[in-house]
Image (spheres, helix red, strand yellow):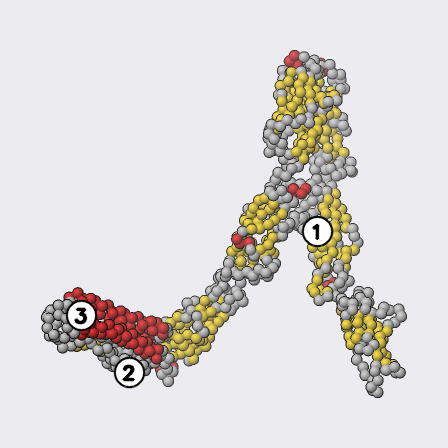
């Protein structure tokens, strides 16, 4: 055990080592193991067998070496040795974040790309198992990113923070180690932490007036110093609002003043001293920074009318008295024409006659509600009715704010009053999840392993709570090889999927986004497989034979099963030829021809003194993919000149069929079948003609002889063929005429003899040039005479019976000739 090491993830109870020892006297020995008193007893040993067993869990991070004393004894003598066992690392420690919690304060005007904070995690393992990388969990959409190595949290390029939109962001950072072995399996451990990014407000918004437009009235009995109306403005920055100051810019002519802190506008003169009936004032509000300096400004017009003793404007009342604010909660998209019954509003003008007549209208987003009645005399109950249900949308407006305006009709003063109507909308499941696009297109290499991510689809449901949660699924004939994560929308290939662009290059299916109540939308997904050069070019045969006529090229072709260019484009080349410098090849088409310097067979004899006309070439077909694949084939070329083709049609036919011998067999078999068919047809027609004429025709044989032309030899090494002479000559031989040919005589002249069947052909195929004939037999027998019973009818009947064997012999002879011809062909091939 001097150099013994043990992984820290070794299971307790494992047999880890065996001690072996002997005693010179042959006495039995026993084994022992011990440890320092301050150390753990990690191992135990079988005293008889020497098997060492792990009895305590190992932890390299706590103890990377174990010292033990092993001993052997025969009962009298003891031999001991101190050994050190090394504990090797396993990936059993997960990363651990330090300095938690992480809370970051970030001003909203922080430039994009800035570093905000750093998270840090440590892993006590060694090697790759101790390396830590960082990433954000569910980063889409997010304005933040984290450096995978340093853990620095940054504001992404192009992203900005806005306090008015989001005051805090909550991020989940994942720390993952580099992976390693644990109990025989590859494991990757990780840890997460929450990072809170609080956005600090900065002064970037101008002040905003509330309650515009502003109208004020000064009655004839108004006292100087009385307040006419109050304008209200506030800083647009709600986090740390600045103090605002009001001032009159122009239009008052010294008749009005404004309180710079409250915004109250007061009249400074008696109404009888005012020269105009309408004053258009311009009020300016200015922010005051924390340093006391003026900042952003805004301006609003204020209209003030001077009126006579029509001193009672319309007033709105609630259930408990005068009221200028009414609130109501209701669900979005109420039915068209529904009355807002939760609002109990009464409007009243204490004046009389024309001064008490006024109009009612709603000021705010138009076309959503309408008010009834629209014209009031003295007093009326106000009813608000839903006009546009679709516009009452929680996703657009969580709160609808209107001003109920009552303005006099017939008075020059046009007294008016307003009441705020605030409607708090409650959400319903009224939205269908919608994809960010109707179509998604992705490309993936055909050699992508199973489980590879293809693309991510995104659908958004504006509803809140569980109604806004989206679940994804896919379906369609092209979805068999793909899966989708139900919550993230990531489409990936099946773990077992094997993609092949040559089999199916494009897939098309649908993805469905559905909320909890089954409302859904669809999008179409198109996935294209990118071809990878994974097929070798292939020749039809690895060894091919071609005949080249002097002056004409031959062609060799290969195919590549890859789906796209340039993977399936081939270039041809001659890699080896003996002798060299005889042939050229077209790199694109594979056509091979003799070099221009070789124009005759004499030139070939100069290159090859032996006079051989057969050359062997090694031709390579190489595709243009990356990496490129190539295949070679051996091509044997027989070169003949044009004189050989002029020696006869049979020589030309043999030259043409040398590369495909089965073609020659098919042609010969076809010729024989045609000859047999014609013979049978002629014999059948002759028989029926003679039968109708009731004559016994003389027997005729037509013999076709094969001429013996001078043989033409074609020097082709691999084909040795002897031509069978064609039947180009017919010899007609007539049998002796029959004297009683159809004379209808009642004499005793016997009818004509039927021809004897031909002798059976020899079974051994003959390679000679013996002529062969195709016999034809025709004839008919006269009817027997029933008036004179005699043995003659028997002879006739006997001869009629002979007719059937004759025809059978004819068919048998033809069949034997055909079989004999087939034997010739088989012997040739």
Indicate left or right for 728 with 823 as reference: left
Indicate left or right for 713 with 40 as reference: left
Q: Quadrant of residue 493?
A: bottom right
Q: Circle 1 — which element? A: strand
- Percent x, y of residue 148: 70, 57
Name the residue: 61% across, 40% down.
Answer: 431
Question: Which residue position holds label 1?
Answer: 154
Question: Which residue position holds label 3?
Answer: 780
Q: Do the residues labelled 1 and 2 touch (CB within 8 Å)?
A: no
Q: Can residue 302 be seen in this view?
A: no
Name the residue: 64% across, 29% down.
Answer: 364
Question: Which residue position holds label 2?
Answer: 768
Depth check, mark 1 against mark 2: the one in front is 2
- Percent x, y of residue 79: 86, 81
Earlier-in-chain disc, 1 versus 2: 1
Q: In which quarter of the image is residue 638?
A: bottom left
In front: 587, or 341?
Answer: 341
Name the residue: 50% across, 60% down.
Answer: 503
In front: 213, or 449?
Answer: 449
Depth check, mark 2 against mark 3: the one in front is 3
């Amino acid at each position: 055990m001097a150099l013994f090491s043990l992984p820290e993830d070794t299971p307790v109870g494992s047999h880890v080592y065996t001690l072996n020892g002997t005693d010179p006297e042959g006495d039995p020995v026993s084994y022992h193991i011990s440890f320092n008193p301050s150390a753990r007893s990690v191992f135990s040993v079988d005293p008889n067998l020497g098997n060492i067993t792990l009895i305590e869990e190992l932890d390299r991070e706590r103890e990377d070496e174990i010292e033990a004393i092993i001993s052997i004894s025969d009962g009298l003598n003891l031999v001991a040795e101190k050994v050190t066992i090394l504990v090797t690392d396993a990936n059993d420690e997960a990363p651990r974040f330090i300095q938690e919690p992480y809370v970051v304060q970030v001003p909203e005007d922080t430039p994009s790309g800035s570093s905000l904070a750093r998270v840090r995690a440590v892993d006590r393992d060694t090697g790759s198992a101790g390396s830590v990388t960082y990433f954000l969990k569910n980063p889409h959409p997010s304005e933040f990113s984290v450096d995978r190595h340093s853990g620095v949290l940054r504001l992404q390029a192009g992203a900005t923070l806005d306090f008015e939109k989001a005051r805090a962001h909550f991020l989940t950072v994942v720390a993952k180690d580099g992976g390693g072995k644990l109990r025989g399996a590859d494991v990757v451990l990780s840890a997460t932490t929450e990072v809170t990014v609080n956005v600090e407000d900065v002064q970037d918004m101008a002040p905003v007036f509330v309650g515009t437009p502003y109208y004020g009235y000064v009655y004839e009995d108004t006292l100087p110093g009385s307040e006419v109306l109050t304008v209200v403005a506030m800083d647009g920055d709600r986090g740390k609002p600045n103090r605002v100051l009001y001032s009159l810019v122009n239009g008052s002519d010294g008749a009005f003043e404004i309180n710079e802190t409250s915004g109250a506008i007061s009249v400074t003169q008696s109404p009888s001293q005012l020269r105009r009936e309408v004053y258009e004032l311009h009020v300016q509000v200015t922010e005051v920074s924390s340093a006391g300096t003026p900042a952003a400004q805004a301006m609003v017009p204020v209209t003030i009318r001077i009126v006579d003793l029509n001193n009672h404007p319309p007033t709105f009342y609630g259930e408990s008295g005068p009221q200028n604010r009414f609130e109501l909660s209701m669900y979005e998209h109420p039915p068209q024409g529904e009355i807002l019954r939760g609002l109990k509003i009464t409007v009243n003008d204490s004046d009389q006659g024309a001064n008490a007549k006024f109009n009612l209208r709603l000021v705010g987003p138009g076309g959503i509600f309408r008010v009834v009645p629209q014209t009031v005399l003295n007093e009326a109950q106000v009813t608000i009715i839903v006009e546009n249900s679709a516009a009452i949308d929680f996703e657009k407006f969580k709160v609808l704010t209107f001003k109920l305006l009552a303005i006099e009709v017939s008075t020059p003063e046009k007294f008016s009053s307003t009441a705020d109507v605030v409607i708090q909308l409650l959400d319903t499941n009224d939205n269908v999840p919608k994809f960010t696009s109707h179509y998604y297109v992705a490309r993936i290499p055909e050699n992508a392993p199973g489980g590879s991510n293809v693309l991510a689809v995104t659908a958004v449901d504006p509803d809140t709570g569980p109604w806004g949660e989206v679940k994804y699924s896919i379906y369609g004939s092209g979805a068999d090889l793909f899966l989708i994560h139900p919550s993230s929308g990531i489409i990936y290939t099946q773990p077992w999927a094997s993609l092949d662009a040559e089999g199916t290059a494009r897939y098309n299916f649908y993805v469905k986004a559905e909320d909890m109540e089954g409302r859904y939308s669809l999008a179409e997904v198109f996935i294209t497989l990118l071809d990878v050069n994974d097929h070798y070019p292939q020749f039809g045969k690895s060894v091919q034979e071609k005949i080249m006529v002097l002056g004409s090229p031959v062609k060799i072709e290969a195919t590549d099963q890859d789906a796209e260019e340039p993977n399936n484009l081939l270039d041809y080349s001659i890699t080896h030829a003996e002798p060299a410098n005889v042939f050229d090849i077209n790199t694109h088409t594979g056509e091979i021809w003799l070099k221009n310097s070789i124009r005759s067979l004499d030139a070939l004899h100069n290159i090859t003194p032996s006079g051989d006309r057969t050359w062997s070439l090694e031709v390579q077909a190489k595709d243009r993919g990356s990496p490129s694949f190539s295949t070679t084939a051996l091509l044997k070329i027989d070169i003949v000149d044009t004189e050989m083709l002029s020696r006869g049609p049979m020589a030309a036919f043999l030259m043409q069929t040398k590369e495909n011998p089965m073609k020659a067999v098919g042609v010969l078999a076809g010729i024989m079948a045609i000859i047999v068919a014609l013979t049978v047809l002629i014999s059948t027609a002759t028989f029926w003609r003679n039968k109708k004429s009731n004559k016994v025709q003389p027997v005729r044989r037509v013999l076709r002889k094969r001429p013996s032309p001078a043989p033409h030899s074609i020097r082709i090494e691999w084909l040795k063929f002897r031509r069978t002479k064609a039947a180009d000559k017919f010899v007609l031989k007539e049998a002796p005429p029959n004297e009683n040919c159809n004379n209808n005589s009642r004499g005793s002249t016997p009818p004509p003899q039927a021809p004897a069947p031909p002798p059976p052909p020899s079974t051994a195929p003959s390679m000679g040039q013996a002529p062969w004939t195709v016999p034809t037999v025709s004839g008919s027998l006269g009817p027997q005479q029933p008036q004179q019973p005699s043995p003659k009818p028997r002879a006739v009947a006997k001869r009629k019976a002979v007719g059937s064997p004759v025809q059978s012999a004819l068919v048998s002879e033809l069949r034997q000739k055909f079989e004999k011809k087939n034997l010739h062909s088989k012997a040739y091939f």
